[in-house]
Amino acid sequence: MKRWLPAPLLSVTVFVVWLLLVASLEPAHVLLAAVLALVLPLVAQRLREDTAHARRPGVAARLIVVVLWDIVLSNIEVARRILGRESRMRPAFVWIPLDITNRHGISALAGIITMTPGTVSSELSPDQRHLLVHFLHLEDADAAIAHIKSRYEAPLREVFP
């Protein structure tokens, strides 16, 4: 029973909340609510098991502060750039070589880069060893790579070994 219903209370909650959201007791909605009530707790359990390998909560907390600070600074820089002359911007794509191999760490790195204004993660190479990043303005590719690797990738490697 535990295998099909790893969290019975969560299943009941999903079932009830779905029916409240759709405000209908039609058979199709009840069936969909039942499917969601069975599937979502199983997915949540799988995600918990996959992320149970994260380590170093202190490093993760410092990384969050660094990312939030960088987001504020990047917002100011992007505003300054887009309010200035367009001819002064130098957009570019750069492949960032990755040392991190944990898929959750790579996803977190791609998310951090995308959340930071002025940069967007665009593609992960098939071998998951390089991440393509678009920069709104790039003066020095090597400096940008070093910045991402030291400020984001290095702490993520400690959190997701």
Image: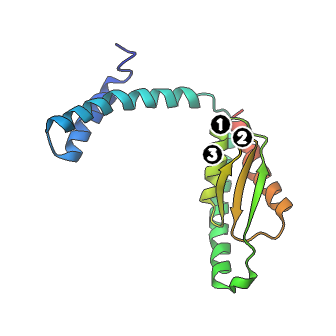
Q: Position of residue 104 (x, y in %)?
A: 62, 38
Furthest residue toward bottom: 85
Q: Is residue 121 above or below residue 85?
A: above
Upstream in sequence: badge 2 or badge 3: 3
Return the residue at label 1: 103
The Cα–Cα distance between marks 1 and 3, rounded to whole angstroms, is 9 Å
Q: Nearer the viewer, mark 2 or mark 3?
A: 2
Amino acid type indicated by mark 3: Ala
Labelled pair 1, 2 in contact (Cβ < 8 Å): yes
Task: Please give left or right for residue 147 compared with residue 4 in the image.
Answer: right
Decide if residue 57 is in sight here: no
**Residue plotted at (71% across, 40% down):** 128
Q: Quadrant of the N terminus?
A: top left
The secondary element bearing badge 3 is classed as: helix
Q: Is residue 34 above or below residue 137?
A: above
Q: In terms of depth relative to the viewer, which is nearer, 123 or 77? A: 123
